[in-house]
Image (cartoon, helix red, strand yellow):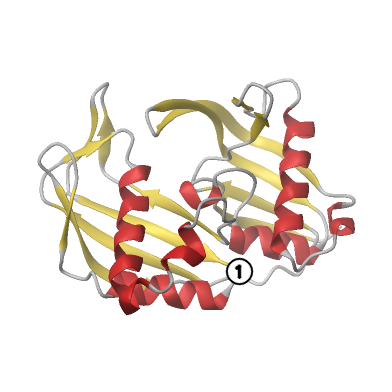
Amino acid sequence: MRFKVELELKNEHLPLDYRPAIISLFKHSLTVYENGKHFNIYYETGKDKPFTFAVGIPNSKFTKEMIVVSNKKIHIIFSTSDIATGIVFFNALLMQKNKSYPLVHENTMTVKNILVEKEFSITTNTIEVMFKSPLCVREHNKENNKDTYYSYEKEGFNEALNNVLELQIANSNTLPMSILEDFAITPIRCKKTVVRHHSQFVEVTVGLFSLTGNIALLNYLYTSGVASRKSSGFGLFEIIRKETL
């Protein structure tokens, strides 16, 4: 299930580290909806969250301090492979319609509309995709509790991505590990960038890739997102082209 949340800002000033504010809106919405009974399902510590999202900020200018959004409009694309999760978040956010939610810079955001988006059914084993939220690949070292992030050009990217995908498939509880056989990701037109997330600088990749693999796997990644920090606004892609090998 995929839907679009249209929001209106009180003023033009959006923080560079905006994803935590979207997560906060999600948490607030779940707290209010049906007396909060769904909150721990998704936000209990250590829970794997079966969704991804991307924030669209058109007509904007990035400065060192903030993002200037000239038309004061942004949107969220929310996607999940689990229809029950999609319904819960859709209804929870719908309850927030026309209610302002606080941001920094003396700003607020208000849900103005929610629209169900058309999903594509992938029927070929190669697709070209554009990442609408950055591809984030994280390697966590338990011994020193430190994270290493890999953009596509960093040595070890493919190995780190494969490790993350193995964990993602294991947590899905629906797909066999063998489904990752023959999976490949090929950069076409992309670039390394650094984004702020929870006051940290995170190395990620944006742009166009080719994905090849099992059709069921590609459909799962399309609806659930790819790699690390999916539920924090990373790893959502749109299909640009489908090909048959």
Q: In this rendering, would 167 be left or right of 55? A: right
Q: Position of residue 123 (x, y in %)?
A: 75, 70
Vertical arrangement, residue 21 with respect to residue 150, above or below:
below
Residue 92 in percent (x, y) is at 34, 72
Location of residue 174 by image quarter: bottom right
Q: Nearer the viewer, residue 117 or 30?
A: 30
Residue annotated with mark 1: 81
Q: Which residue occupies 69% across, 65% down?
A: 219
The residue under the point 35% across, 44% down is: 20
Q: Which one is in front, 63 or 148? A: 148
Question: In percent of the image, x 84 and y 53: which residue is there?
Answer: 180
Residue 114 seen in the current view: no
Q: Quadrant of the C terminus?
A: bottom right
**Mark 1 secondary-structure assignment:** loop
Q: Position of residue 243 (x, y in %)?
A: 76, 59
Q: Which residue is located at x 63 percent, y 60 percent? A: 222
Q: Is residue 63 left or right of residue 237?
A: left
Which three-letter amino acid code belongs to the residue tagged 1?
Ser
Count the marks: 1
- 95 left or right of 196 in image: left
Q: Nearer the viewer, residue 40 or 208?
A: 40
Residue 231, percent from left and from top: 50, 52
Relative to residue 140, is residue 80 depicted above or below? below
Residue 36 is drawn in which quadrant? bottom left
Is residue 38 in view? yes
Left or right of 55 in this view: 243: right
- Residue 66 found in image quarter: top left
